[in-house]
Amino acid sequence: MKTATFLMDDAVRDPAKVFQSPADVVDAQSLNHEQKLKILRHREFDCRELLVAEDENMIGGKPARLREVLQAMARLGAHSGDLADRE
């Protein structure tokens, strides 16, 4: 389905634009387990980049929600660094 593919591409590129919270990714009925993990891993990466920027006094963006992302990944049975990105 083209719409689902488009949504998935957008969600991977910018998860925060498609889903309000990491829990929303977990609860998404239209995504399978692997897609949810892929989106959350990208969101985890984004959060970690924000934290690095904050450490370097580059402030002004959205707050990092790393804890929420890791909790959502744990709900799916995965942890940070699990399952290398498959495209």
Image (spheres, helix red, strand yellow):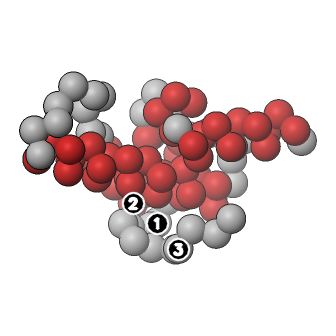
* Of the image marks 3 and 2, the number of the one nearer the N terminus: 2
x and y, in percent, of residue 24 in the image: 51, 35
Q: Which residue is mark 2?
A: 74
The residue depicted at 36 percent of the width and 66 percent of the height is 80
Residue positioned 68% across, 65% down in the render? 87
Q: Which mark is residue 84?
A: 3
Q: Is residue 41 left or right of residue 86?
A: left
Identified by mark 1, the residue type is Gly
**Residue 23, position as x, y percentages in the image:** 45, 40
- The answer to which of 62 and 79 lies nearer the viewer is 62
Where disc 2 sits, the SS reads helix
Q: CA distance from mark 1 to mark 3?
A: 15 Å
The residue at 38%/47% (across/down) is 46
Q: Which residue is identified by label 1?
A: 77
How packed mark 3 is, by other alpha carbons closer than 10 Å (few <14, some 14-19, many 20 or more), is few
Q: Is residue 75 visible?
A: no
79 lies above or below 60: below
Asked whether disc 1 touches disc 3, contact meaning CB atoms under 8 Å apart, the reply is no
Give the mark toward the camera: 1 or 3. 3
Q: Nearer the viewer, mark 3 or mark 2?
A: 3
Q: Amino acid at mark 2?
A: Ala
First in residue order: circle 1 vs circle 3: 1
Would you call the spot at circle 2 few (<14 residues within 10 Å), some (14-19), or many (20 or more)? few
Q: Give the structural element (helix, strand or loop) at label 1.
A: loop
**Do the CB atoms of the residues marked 2 and 1 lie less than 8 Å apart?**
yes
> Relative to residue 21, is residue 30 drawn left or right?
right
Residue at 53% across, 46% down: 26
Query: Where residue 15 sits: x, y (%)?
Result: 51, 39
What x and y, as percent, mark residue 18? 57, 30
For marks 3 and 2, give the CA distance: 16 Å
Q: Is residue 40 visible?
A: yes
